[in-house]
Amino acid sequence: MLGGLVASTDDPAERAAALTEGRALLEAGSACHNHLLFAEEAIEGCLAAGELDAALAAADALEAHTAAEPVALVAFHVARARTLVARKRSGPSPELAARLAELAAKAGRLGLLREARALAALAGTPASGEAFRASTREAP
């Protein structure tokens, strides 16, 4: 619920309060999926609001939580957040376009078609093809 508030509010104070409360609840002890769900929404909300440091903080916290047992889905969301922040800070570049295309293909393999299409569009690559219809999916 707090992650959804972070992603949906236009009020910076409300977003900051929801981020603080959500982080506190996770730090107090919570199931792994709650960390992932909160971070996904926090990253999205912070990126949309232009709060790039907060988006990176959410990605870093998620990565730290799963460091002992890495998860492909977490690695994707962390890499995506870092790449989108880099693009917002420095603008488009061939290097970032290549990273975005790699992430689009990875999203397709993970079954994240919405993310795959959005990343492919940012990369300037087609949003269809084998990467998006992969019959073998990576375990999230």
Image: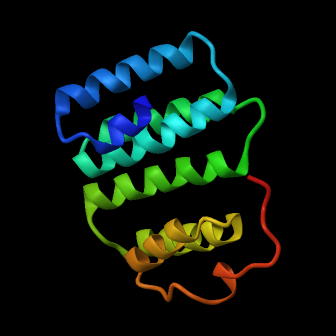
Q: Residue at x 55, y 19 (%)?
A: 26
Give the residue at the far front of this rendering. Answer: 1
Residue 20: x percent and y percent? Answer: 36, 19
Report the residue at 17% width, 35% height from top.
11
Q: Is residue 125 above or below residue 87?
A: below
The structure residue drawn at horizontal position 45% and vertical position 34%, both measured from the top left corner, is 58
Q: Which percent across, then down, holds residue 134?
A: 74, 79
> Number of callouts in the render?
0
> Is 49 left or right of 77, judged from the image as shown?
left
Residue 122 falls left or right of residue 108: left
* Quarter of the image where the N terminus is located: top left
Tell which residue pokes out farthest to the right in this image.
136
Q: Is residue 124 above or below residue 42?
A: below
* Residue at the outermost top position: 28
Residue at the (57%, 9%) spot, across then down = 28
Q: Position of residue 83 (x, y in %)?
A: 44, 57
Q: Along the horizontal axis of the image, is 42 left or right of 75?
A: left
Residue 6 image point, x, y percent:
34, 36
Question: In terms of image quadrants, where is residue 68?
Answer: top right
- Toward which corner of the image does residue 9 lie, by quadrant? top left
Q: Viewer-proximal residue, 112 or 4?
A: 4
Q: Nearer the viewer, residue 109 or 18?
A: 18
Above or below, 134 against 90 in this view is below
How is this picture coloured? rainbow
